[in-house]
Image (cartoon, grey):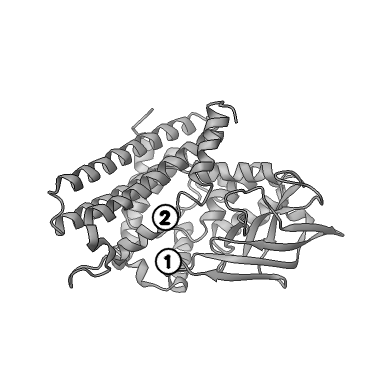
């Protein structure tokens, strides 16, 4: 495991740090600022920010130059994640496209798909959402009931997806559809790239306990998609989905560690303000979280070293997803334990507003479910990494 960066990588860090300092408005760095905006206001600000960042050459850090990227190393991408979190830069509005779909298209997409999709995605001209989960399927990704029937050179799609991130802002959706009649489970599926702006596609928002609507439901009623807009081979959608999810579950943990460590420091500051920092039980809880976060950091650097050496993580990426999601959830459980009853109140004192903390606390409930639940990740690690029997 290598814990250092090269001189060239540190030069990139300084260049990025300088640009971020000159371009991020001061109000964005105030804790809880983004929680004060409506979904629409937040989306538009973040979309405009992404466009400026792309124009300055700070998007697609690890992408090949031929696709509009910077041609950087995995370490430079880790530095990018680290510095944007430290600078309080907002999260991208196109994370599903940029992080998961783009590398999948680069790997198995047709030349036409590469030319038509990657550039507009990088410039945030086209926002992508993901249609995997379905009602009643739980964490069983293979329980796909949405169907696509070939009609000439188009598929006619009928069905419903749920928990669709960015459903209300998505211009297009990549989704798993059953295209072989009579097939079951992971057989007979295809990954279709569907235009959301067409008759027969309806998106409805889902209100979260935090008050936001980052998710939605998507209904397909005789929606049409050209057969050429299938990503990967027809009937091999499960293989395509597994490739795509490996990018999701194995995403760099360096930026996640930096963000979680900042949240940890904020929780410690609140514990001191509420006079809980000297409580031995609270101190033990905070110490346990800190150890868990430092383990996450070293695991992230271990993974980064392997990726730098050209190793394909494959099913081992499930270990990364399992570790960061459990560490994040434990951190916010510690927030509840350490602050006690005050943790349940948005304004326990006139000079204290805990609503930004509540938003993170509520969000942490979901992270061990989406992207494959912790139970699913443990099964993958047991069967495909450790070779244990079913």
Image vertical order of residue 296 relative to residue 217, above or below = above
Residue 225 falls left or right of residue 27: right
Residue on which disc 2 sits: 365
Q: Are the residues at dot 2 and dot 1 in contact (C-beta closer than 8 Å)?
A: yes
Residue 146 found in image quarter: bottom right
- Report how far apart the C-alphas of labels 2 and 1 lie in the structure: 10 Å
- Label 1 CA crowd tier, 10 Å (few <14, some 14–19, many 20+): few
Image vertical order of residue 184 relative to residue 92, above or below = above
> SS at mark 2?
loop
Quadrant in which the N terminus is drawn: top left
Quadrant in which the C terminus is drawn: top right
Nearer-the-camera pick, 94 or 207: 207
Image vertical order of residue 259 relative to residue 135, above or below = above
Q: In the image, what residue occupies the spot 40% across and 66% down?
A: 210
Give the x, y percent position of residue 257. 35, 45
Image vertical order of residue 292 relative to residue 40, above or below = above
Residue 167 found in image quarter: bottom right
What mark, if any, has residue 209 been given in the picture? Answer: 1
Q: In the image, what residue occupies the spot 28% across and 64% down?
A: 344
């Amino acid at each position: 495991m290598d814990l250092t960066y090269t001189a060239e990588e540190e030069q990139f860090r300084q260049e990025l740090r300088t640009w971020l300092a000159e371009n991020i408005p001061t109000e964005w760095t105030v804790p809880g600022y983004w929680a004060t905006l409506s979904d629409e206001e937040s989306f538009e600000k973040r979309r405009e920010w992404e466009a400026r960042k792309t124009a300055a050459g700070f998007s697609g850090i690890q992408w090949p130059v031929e696709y509009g990227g910077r041609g950087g190393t995995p370490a430079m991408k880790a530095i990018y994640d680290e510095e944007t979190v430290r600078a309080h830069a907002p999260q991208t509005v196109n994370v599903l496209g940029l992080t998961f779909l783009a590398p999948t298209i680069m790997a198995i997409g047709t030349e036409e798909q590469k030319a038509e999709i990657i550039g507009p995605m990088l410039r945030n001209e086209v926002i992508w959402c993901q249609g995997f989960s379905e009602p009643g399927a739980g964490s069983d990704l293979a329980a796909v009931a949405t169907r696509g029937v070939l009609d000439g050179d188009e598929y006619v799609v009928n069905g419903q997806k749920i928990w669709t991130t960015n459903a209300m802002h998505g211009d297009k959706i990549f989704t798993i559809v059953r295209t072989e009649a009579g097939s079951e489970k992971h057989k007979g599926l295809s990954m279709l790239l569907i235009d959301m702006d067409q008759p027969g596609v309806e998106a409805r928002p889902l209100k979260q306990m935090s008050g936001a609507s980052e998710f939605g439901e998507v209904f397909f009623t005789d929606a049409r998609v050209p057969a050429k807009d299938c990503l990967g081979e027809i009937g091999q959608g499960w293989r395509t989905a597994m490739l795509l999810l490996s990018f999701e579950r194995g995403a760099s943990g360096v930026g996640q560690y930096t963000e979680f460590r900042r949240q940890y420091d904020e929780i410690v500051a609140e514990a001191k303000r509420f006079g809980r920092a000297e409580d031995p039980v609270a101190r033990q809880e905070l110490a346990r979280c800190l150890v868990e976060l430092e383990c996450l950091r070293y695991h992230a650097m271990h993974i980064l070293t392997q990726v730098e050496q050209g190793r394909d993580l494959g099913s081992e990426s499930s270990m990364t997803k399992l570790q960061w999601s459990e560490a994040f959830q434990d951190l916010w459980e510690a927030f509840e334990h350490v602050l006690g009853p005050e943790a349940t109140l948005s304004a326990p004192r006139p000079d204290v507003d805990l609503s930004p903390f509540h938003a993170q606390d509520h969000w942490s409930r979901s992270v061990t479910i989406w992207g494959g639940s912790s139970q699913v990740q443990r099964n993958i690690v047991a069967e495909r990494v450790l070779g244990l029997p079913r």
